[in-house]
Image (cartoon, grey):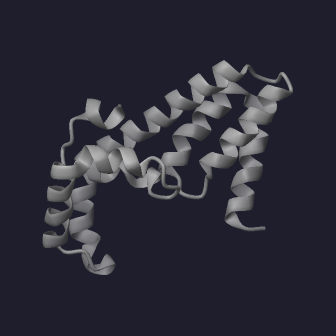
Amino acid sequence: MSVTEAAVELAAYLLARAGLPGLFLLAVAELLVAPIPGEAVFALAGFLSSRGAMGLAEAVLVGTLGNLAGALIEYWLGLRVARPALLKLGKYLMIGERDLEAAEEFFRRRGALAAFLGRFVPGVRSLMGFPAGMARMNPAVFAA
């Protein structure tokens, strides 16, 4: 069983057992823990809604709030932790200080557009908070 399959099984279990609180936790974790596929989580929530296990409007609201919470946690980590960590670990990832400065400058100039478009790209969506926080993007603009 692959990591993704295990994550989907865990998501199905949490949604079936915990309902809306489980959906909130999974929506937060989608942005903070790489192998949790958000598309599968929300598809499962939609299926459970169609079966009457949770309301569709409530699932959409709770899932959206969970994603927002996860994005803001990621933003905070980018603001406080990411730059020092990348400066220490960058040599192993082949990322230098000039690379970080270039990325931060790009995000200062085009961050709102990058954050908006990045939300529609699987994989990229789960990383957008880090550069937004590092570039000190307005959190209200990032969250919008």
Tell whether 33 sits left or right of 87: right
Regarding residue 78, the answer to whether it shows in the image is no
What x and y, as percent, mark residue 127?
40, 54
Relative height, residue 33 to residue 25 (above, below): below
Vertical arrangement, residue 90 with respect to residue 5, above or below: below
Residue drawn 61% across and 52% down?
36
Q: Left or right: 79 with respect to 30?
A: left
The x, y position of residue 52, in whole percent, is: 84, 21
Horizontally, residue 128 falls left or right of residue 4, namely left
Q: Report the residue at 32% width, 77% height from top.
A: 93
Quadrant of the snapshot with the C terminus: top left
Using residue 4 as the reference point, say whether residue 27 is left or right of it: left
Where does the N terminus fall, quadrant-wise?
Answer: bottom right
Asked whether 47 or 18 is in front, the reply is 47
Q: Is residue 77 above or below residue 72?
A: below
- Which residue shows up at 65% across the image and 19% down it? 57
Q: 29 or 144: which is nearer to us?
A: 144
**How far across and down, in percent of the image, does residue 24 sit?**
59, 31
- Does residue 109 appear in the picture of this structure? yes
Q: Residue at x 28, y 56 (%)?
A: 82
On the image, which quarter does residue 7 sit in? Answer: bottom right
Q: Is residue 58 above or below residue 90?
A: above
